[in-house]
Image: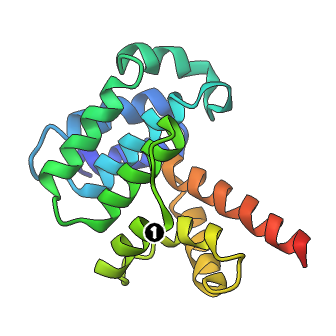
Amino acid sequence: MTLAEQALSFDRERRILAAVETYEQAIKSIDAPLWAILNLEGIYWDACSGPGCSFPEVQDDLLNRGGGGYRLLEIMQIAKARFPESTVAEFWRRYILMRWLDDDFPQDACQQIFDRDPSEQTPLLYLYAFDGGRKWEPEARQLLARFKAEGTVLASSAASFLTSVMKHYDSED
């Protein structure tokens, strides 16, 4: 089992500190998979989310390790540098910065990311929230199932967001 795979297992088991330590070791390698970098990004983002953190028992430790959000920004830059053409890395960077720091991420910018690689459906997480639940409904449901199956902190956060948007749209009907 590789370090990245071991970290993924810890992530899914919510052994957060072990996951972070192992992802950090894994991403030292230039050959680390993008998903490992993004999952580490997701854990640090969750830690920076204040009272909504999924793992409050280790939140302070992660914030101290990560210099507040400084490590999260570094990890985003690692993903961008190693995978400059990745639409999923660009999406998560823009989306997290929008949710965390209130950066601008308009619908058309997200649509452009999606249009560059429609086979990567992660940007539909955000596009679905704009369309009133109509245009992307089937794809959003598939994406929700994928996020739930992945079971990482990042995927769970995405699943939670999609679920809340779907409930909102269902209540409007």
Q: Quadrant of residue 108?
A: bottom left
User: Is residue 117 visible to the viewer in this orientation of the structure?
Assistant: no
Q: Quadrant of the C terminus?
A: bottom right
Whole-percent x, y for residue 162 in the image: 66, 63
| Residue sitting nearer the eye, 153 or 70 | 70
Whole-percent x, y for residue 107 in the image: 50, 67
Does residue 82 lie above or below 133 as drawn? above
Q: Quadrant of residue 138?
A: bottom right
Whole-percent x, y for residue 158 in the image: 57, 56
Q: Amino acid at mark 1?
A: Pro
Dot 1 crowding, Cα within 10 Å, few <14, some 14–19, many 20+: many
Residue under the point 52% across and 29% down: 47
Q: Is residue 70 left or right of residue 124?
A: left
- Is the image coloured rainbow, by chain, by secondary structure, or in one colour? rainbow
Q: Which residue is mark 1?
A: 123
| Residue sitting nearer the eye, 25 or 51 | 51
Does residue 44 lie above or below 67 as drawn? below
Q: Quick one: SS at disc 1?
A: loop
Residue under the point 51% across and 28% down: 48
Residue under the point 16% across and 59% down: 84
